Amino acid sequence: MTETFEVERMEVLEGVRRIVAAGLVSGSSGNVSRRIRRDGGDLMAVTASGVAYRRLSIEHVVVVDLAEIEPVYGDGVPSSESLSHAAIYTARADVGAVVHTHSVHASAYAVAGRPIPAVMDEQSVYLGGAIEVAEYGPSSSEKLAQNAVHALADRAAVLLRNHGVISVGAAVDEACNVAELVERVAHVHLLATALGGAIALPDDVLRAEQQVYRMMKGIRA
């Protein structure tokens, strides 16, 4: 009997519904995936390419082999950003889900090529500090994937130059939490800048909170 990965695919679908409801994507922009850990090589359940979210169903969540990005279950074409998702899973054993959004305020920073400094306690505790900007890479390319991995490092979010945001977590819910927090931090930082300047967290506070982040993630400093 063929395994259908229904639980994992439904988690991805619920993640899509959440980021749509939060206004972090529109149309068919962005994508969501979830790692499926298996002996002999991990898989990932990922949204299919080019399907409008208003008609997305579980049938539009494809399961692919992480190493080859080849479909294992489902008839759709995997998201065009599957390379970036797979590269992050390969680089980060702690990551179980990846969410890619085009949220307005965070994307504005990505288009401006400006990182978002660590200005809020929850930002450093839950995101790992400043939200850096990855060097530009064409959409869907290996270059974009590697640039994203490099700029993400051990943090929970990264801005993609001239593109959008990637957020990661141990599970889909956590990655969605990160995506929502990134957008809120971007909005707050933009407003604070308009009010005369955002004040970064003191260095000692930032270091202490980053340590908390790493402890929660099980990441060795």
Image (spheres, grey):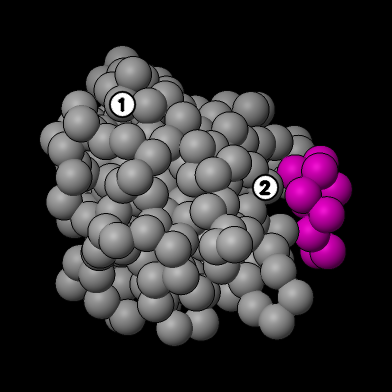
Q: Which residue is mark 1?
A: 20
> N-terminal of the two: label 1 or label 2?
1
| Occupied quadrant, residue 59 | top left
Left or right, 37 with reference to 153 = right
* Rendered residue at 44%/83% (across/down): 68
* Rendered residue at 69%/64% (across/down): 37
Range of magenta residues: 212-221
Q: Is residue 38 magenta?
A: no
Q: Quadrant of the N terminus?
A: bottom right
Q: Is residue 216 magenta?
A: yes
Find residue 110 and report its horizontal and vertical position in percent.
26, 49
SS at mark 2? Answer: loop
Q: Badge 1, how many Cα within 10 Å: few under 14, some, many 20+? A: some
Q: Quadrant of the C terminus?
A: bottom right
Q: Amino acid at mark 2?
A: Ala
Q: Which mark is residue 170?
A: 2
Residues 193 and 28: in front is 28
Residues 3 and 117: in front is 3
Residues 198 and 38: in front is 38
Q: CA distance from mark 1 to mark 2?
A: 20 Å
Find residue 70 and report its horizontal and vertical position in percent.
39, 77
Q: Amino acid at mark 1?
A: Val
SS at mark 1? Answer: helix
